[in-house]
Image (spheres, helix red, strand yellow):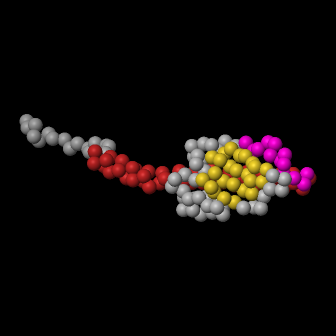
Amino acid sequence: MRHSNQLRRVRAPCGGFTLIELMITVAVIGILVRVALPSYLDYVKRGKISEAFNTLSSYSLALGQFYQDNRTYVGGCATPPTSTNFTYSCTLAATSYTLTATGSTPATTGFTYTLTDTGARATPAAPSNWTTSTTCWVNSRSGACQ
């Protein structure tokens, strides 16, 4: 008769992960998120603010055509463009104008961009961690301009 010691069976290792392996994986994912998330959010923000640049440029062309037809800018802003990310307004005089785009969503709040009849671009307002400019449209946190 065999003793119970002699009948030991070798167990196959259990599938799964140890607690240490799981903790290391969670830590690595946390580090990646902490590094990548701000860059991704800035990328999304830059995509939304480019809408203001395109709309202000188009609006300027329409006002130029209005001036060619009427020899005045007065009355040229009857219907400002609509957008989900910005509100648009214009200040008109007979021979000049200033177009303004103001951020209206959480991603664009704090941004204000202007364009004048002479083509002068400015960023008079931006969120606290962005820069402003009197000579260009700021399109990144680093202060790069368009």
> Do we see residue 17 in this rendering?
yes
Q: Which residue sits at x=78%, y=58%? A: 117
Instruction: Tell me if residue 22 comes above or below residue 144 in the rendering.
Output: above
Is 138 within the magenta? no
Residue 74 is situated, as x and y percent measured from the top left of the image, at: 84, 48
Residue numbers of the magenta segment: 70-82
Please give the name of the residue rendered at 80% of the width and 46% of the height, measured from the top-left corner: 77
Q: Position of residue 138 (x, y in %)?
A: 61, 59
Relative image position of residue 81 (x, y in whole percent): 75, 44
Q: Is residue 37 left or right of residue 101?
A: left
Q: Is residue 2 visible?
A: no
Decide if residue 22 is on the left or right side of residue 88.
Answer: left
**Residue 58 at x, y percent in the picture:** 77, 53
The residue located at (42%, 52%) in the rendering is 34
Quarter of the image where the C terminus is located = bottom right
Disc count in the image? 0
Question: Who is closer to the viewer here, 98 or 105?
Answer: 98
Look at the image and tell me in which quarter the N terminus lies: top left
Image position of 116 (left or right of 4): right
Q: Quadrant of residue 82?
A: top right
Residue 74 within the segment the image draws in magenta: yes
- Residue at 61 percent of width and 51 percent of height: 111
Q: Could you say which is closer to the camera, residue 17 or residue 113? A: 113
Magenta stretch, main secondary structure, is loop
Residue at the limit of the structure toward the right, as seen here:
69
